Image (cartoon, rainbow, N blue to C red):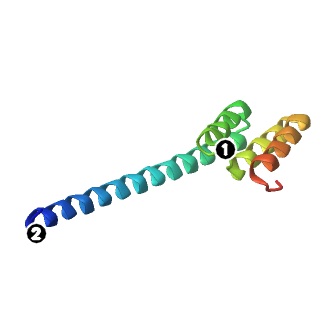
């Protein structure tokens, strides 16, 4: 392989690597933004006493990130606000099993 072809090949590899890294970074940032939006929505619904909508928002976060402590905390807070302490305890225990964090 001559030097010119080698330089072109290396340039292509570097360009592809940059594009892949940029795509991964963009997807990660998009995931973070989606989680933040859902957490904010859950908090808003909880404040408005729309408990079922709050639970749905927090559970959407867990679909994206099953170890998200804030989502578990939101679910526990929602069940406490609903007076369903048994489910609140269940999710607190699940949160500890999944994340190792006490909530």
Relative to 4, 32 lies left or right = right
Q: How crowded is mark 2: few (under 14 residues within 10 Å), some or many (20 or more)?
A: few
Which residue is tagged 2? 3
Quadrant for the N terminus in the image: bottom left
Q: Is residue 101 above or below residue 4?
A: above
Q: Which residue is drawn at 83% across and 55% down?
A: 102
Measured as percent of width and height from the top left, residue 81 is found at 83, 40
User: As drawn, is 29 to the left or to the right of 36?
Assistant: left
- How far from the left and from the top, in percent, is residue 41? 61, 43
Q: Position of residue 45 (x, y in %)?
A: 67, 39
Circle 1 sits on which residue?
Answer: 66
Q: Residue 32 carries which label?
A: none
Q: Secondary structure beneath disc 2?
A: helix
* Residue positioned 85% across, 40% down in the render: 88
Which residue: 63% across, 38% down? 57
Quadrant placement of the C terminus: bottom right
Q: Which dot, 1 or 2, sits closer to the camera? A: 2
Q: Is residue 36 left or right of residue 51?
A: left
Residue at point 79%, 56% (across, down)? 101
Q: Can you name the residue that lies furthest to the bottom here?
A: 3
Q: Sequence order check: which comes first, mark 1 or mark 2?
A: 2
| Image height of 19 relative to 88, above or below | below
* Secondary element at image label 1: loop
């Amino acid at each position: 392989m001559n030097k010119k072809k080698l330089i072109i090949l290396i340039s292509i590899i570097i360009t592809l690597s940059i594009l892949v890294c940029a795509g991964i970074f963009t997807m990660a940032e998009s995931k973070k933004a989606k989680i933040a939006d859902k957490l904010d929505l859950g908090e808003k619904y909880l404040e408005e006493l729309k408990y079922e909508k709050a639970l749905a928002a927090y559970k959407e976060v867990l679909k994206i990130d099953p170890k998200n402590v804030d989502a578990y905390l939101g679910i526990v807070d929602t069940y406490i606000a609903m007076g369903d302490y048994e489910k609140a305890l269940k999710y607190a225990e699940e949160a500890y099993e999944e994340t190792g964090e006490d909530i």
